[in-house]
Amino acid sequence: MKHFLTILSHEVRMLLVSPSTYIAAVAFLSLMGFVFMGILEDYSKMPQDTSPASVFFLYYWIPVIFMVPLLTMKCLAEERRLGTIETLLTTPVSTAEVVMGKYGAAYILYMVFWLSSAGFFYILKHFAGDAHLIDPGPILGGYLFIAVSGLFFVAIGVFASSLSRNQAVAGMICAVLLFGVILGVEYLARASWLDREALAPLKEAVNYARVFQHYEDFTRGIVDVRELLFYVSGTVLALIFSILSVEAKLLHS
């Protein structure tokens, strides 16, 4: 992996000059800014049992579903469309280095976007008179959840980009996969037909994969090793499939 850092720095520069990056940044900060203002407006009307941070991070799935596709849809799809990935791989660079470099760049930008939202809490700290509003526990737990879950979500985006030459198609595939992982699993966990005894193993597997439950645990200060394993193993599998997909397309091109 000696060429990884070179590819990573190049991909970060490419993302910084890409219009889709700034579209994602503006959309993310605008959306989460409105969400944050709405939360504070509710808190100004009546006291709440939870801190604003717990409610703020509850909406994590909205920016994830549109932001991750924008950050990852062109990372491999565009290379394949232009035929530059074949040229790149004729140099002493492995497919794994290419995929990991593009993944690392997208993940760094993903975290930069989320960390920029810390400015909301910084402003709140300087203007709020109630210490309950700026409880550091849910804030730190929320960002830890974002960092850990983001590993898997961005890997899904890279995998989706490896499946198509068309950026738009790759973006749609990514959005559908993320929707299924986040909201689809939550729907299954609440489905009454899964309560049958014969489906108990499936019910247990679905509960294990509930991202919303993971979010609640992290914001309450509970870091379950099983949940960490879920995201790490999911990330590794998605990246392995991405590498295999790129190599398979090269063999048939």
Image (tube, helix red, strand yellow):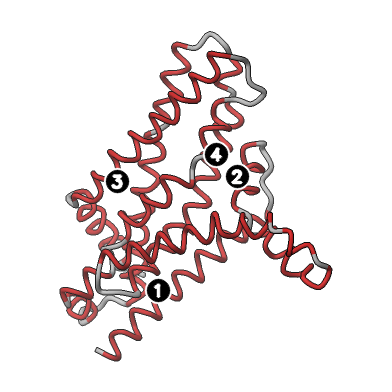
Q: Are marks 2 and 4 in contact (CB under 8 Å)?
A: yes
Instruction: Answer with mark 2 or mark 4, whichever residue precedes in sequence.
Output: 4
Label 1 with label 2: CB-CB less than 8 Å: no
- Which picture quadrant has residue 96? bottom left
Which residue does the numbered mark 1 point to in the structure image? 242
The quarter in which the C terminus is drawn is: bottom left
Give the Cα separation between the discs numbered 2 and 4: 7 Å
Mark 1, mark 3: which one is toward the viewer?
3
Q: Earlier in the sequence, mark 2 or mark 3?
A: 3
- The correct choice, above or below, for 27 with respect to 163 in the image is above
Q: Residues within 10 Å of mark 4 (few under 14, many from 20)?
A: some
Residue 24: mark in rendering: 3
Q: Earlier in the sequence, mark 4 or mark 3?
A: 3
The x and y percentages for residue 167 are 25, 65
What's the distance in space between the residues labelled 4 and 3, CA to CA?
A: 19 Å
Instruction: Check the picture and name the quadrant holding the N terminus.
Output: bottom left
For marks 1 and 4 on the same chain, the one whose residue lies earlier in the sequence: 4
Q: Which mark is residue 58?
A: 4
